[in-house]
Every structure is written in C-alpha cells, then in structure tokens.
Image: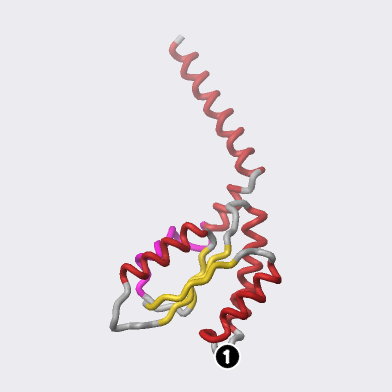
Amino acid sequence: LQRTKICMVFESSINLFILMSYRYTCNGLLNMLDRNRRVKPHPERFQEYKGLSDVIICCEERVYGEVYECILMNAQIEHCHLVHIINMDIEDNEEEAITGAALLCQLCTMLEKSADLDTEIEGILSNFENICKRRILHAVCFL
C-alpha cells in the first residue's frame, strides 16, 4: 500500500512537470529564460554597478523609478557626471521582448548618432515616441 502511494505521488509529479513544461513552453517563458541564461551568467543589480554611464535604459516604469531614486540617494559631488535615464515599458512576454529589443536597438542607434546628446536628446526621444507609438520617460541626473 505504501509503495502504491509513492508511485501515485511520483506519477502525479511527473504529470505536473509535463503539464507545466508544456504551459511554460507555450507562453514563451522557457524560451525567455534560456535566452537570458545565454546573454548573462547571473542577474545583475544596478546598485552594484560602479562605472559611469551617459544613458541608462529601463524597460519597466517601476525600475526606472528605483534607478532614479538610487542615483539621487547616492550622488557624489566629486563626479558630477550627467546621465540620462530613459524608460520604455516592455511587457514580460516573448513577443513583446522581441519587439521591445528591436525598438531599443533603434533608439540606441539614434542616440549614438547624436553629435551633442545633452542638447539633442529631447528631440530624439520625441521623434522616437512618434515612431514606436509608446510613451517614453526621461530624466536627467548627476552621478
């Protein structure tokens, strides 16, 4: 009787694993996780980054707010390095991730081509909003 219960639990676990694998494959989650695994070895935290950047791009308004607050809380007077924080919301699904990545590559190309980013960025972002039909958030801070 005990062996039968163990077999039933094991069989139920296998069925659940198969069902969940199918579900997460269908909704693209396993593909996104696999892609993320190949792109970077582990999750990264903005708060641990020690370098200076001219532009920080976020893909979620909540993260944009956290980055902005983190910079304000940790600003060091001796650097006074201007940084642009940009946000374009991207839903957490495979289709939106692919579309969002292509759009952000386009935005980065536009920013990279700028001769004077600090004076041209508002126009670039306005133009980009018209192209992608999405709301873009922008803030300027000093690192």
Residue nearest the viewer, comparing 26 with 62: 62
Residue nearest the viewer, comparing 24 with 99: 99
Q: Please tell me which residue is depicted at 35% across the width and 70% down the height of the picture.
A: 72
Q: What element carries label 1?
A: loop
Question: Label 1 sits on what residue type?
Answer: Ala
Task: Kindly indicate the quadrant of the structure image that contains residue 12.
Answer: top right
Task: Kindly indicate the quadrant of the structure image that contains residue 134.
Answer: bottom right
Image height check: is 30 above or below 40? Answer: above
Q: How crowded is mark 1: few (under 14 residues within 10 Å), some or many (20 or more)?
A: few
Q: Return the residue found at the far top.
A: 1
x, y percent for residue 6: 46, 19
Q: Name the residue under label 1.
A: 115
x, y percent for residue 109: 62, 79
Q: Give the range drawn in magenta.
A: 37-50
Q: Please tell me which residue is depicted at 39% across the width and 82% down the height of the picture.
A: 81
What is the tally of numbered marks visible in this picture?
Answer: 1
Residue nearest the viewer, comparing 48 with 89: 89
x, y percent for residue 92: 58, 52
Q: Please tell me which residue is depicted at 38% across the width and 65% down the height of the picture.
A: 69
Q: Please tell me which residue is depicted at 59% across the width and 39% down the height of the picture.
A: 21
Q: Is residue 45 magenta?
A: yes
Q: Is residue 101 magenta?
A: no
x, y percent for residue 44: 42, 62
